[in-house]
Amino acid sequence: MNSILKKTAAGFTAALIIFATACGTKPVVEDHGKQESVTPTAGAEATQTPEVKEPEQNEPRAQEEYKILKKGDVAPDFTATLTDGSTFTLSEHKDEVVLINFWATWCPPCVAELPDFEKLAGENIENFTLIAVNCTEEEKTVDAFIEKNGYTFKVAYDVDYTIGMKYPTDGIPYTVIVKDGIIKKIYLGRKSYETFKKAIEENLGK
């Protein structure tokens, strides 16, 4: 009986650790270069890739054609509408270090990172841009959340997930740091202000 209770407690602790760092279906270890899948613990269900039909002529390309990104890859370009009504196009910021974060209001680790992004944006770092791309939520939901919390950094809508499909991930928060159009760092799960600040300064040559 004692061994059963110990195993149950261990499994519950592992689940809490995963929930506290990232919202997703499969635990992943972040190594600043690529995402590595972790073998699920006893009782956990592995995420399997569903079988997908070949697209017929004139059908949109399927999401599975986008590959998991790694350090050194070209960052997929995108144009997004921001909460202030302006637009943001990644390729227009090639001379800057750009931090792109994918998040949602229902994701506790995502929400916990946002004050650090507000702090970074408020430092007005030269040649640095930060943009947080919301994942699939309605514009009114995003607007209400941003207004309630008083955030002033760039926040983009991605209601139909067209941006998210270009940056596949096993969970959020998911953050990439781009310089000269190339991905320099990849982070999955909540990270600290110090981690992001160090990465930004390294890529700015400070």
Image: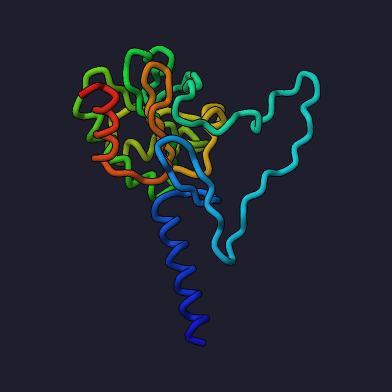
- How many discs mark residues in the rendered view? 0
Residue 42 image offset from top left, x and y in percent: 57, 66
> Measured along the vertical axis of the image, is residue 193 above or below residue 77?
below
Residue occupying the point 45% across, 63% down = 14
Residue occupying the point 39% across, 18% down = 86
> Quadrant where the C terminus lies?
top left
Residue occupying the point 22% across, 35% down = 119
Residue 103 image offset from top left, x and y in percent: 43, 39
> Measured along the vertical axis of the image, is residue 72 above or below residue 180?
below
Q: Residue furthest bottom?
A: 1
Q: With 171 as the anchor, is 54 left or right in this view?
A: right
The structure's colour scheme is: rainbow
Residue 147 image offset from top left, x and y in percent: 32, 36
Residue occupying the point 40% across, 20% down = 85
- Between 113 and 195, which is closer to the camera in this rendering? 195
Q: With 179 as the anchor, is 123 left or right in this view?
A: left
Q: Residue furthest right?
A: 56
Residue 164 image offset from top left, x and y in percent: 52, 32
- Between 107 and 187, which is closer to the camera in this rendering? 187
Q: With 52 as the anchor, is 84 left or right in this view?
A: left
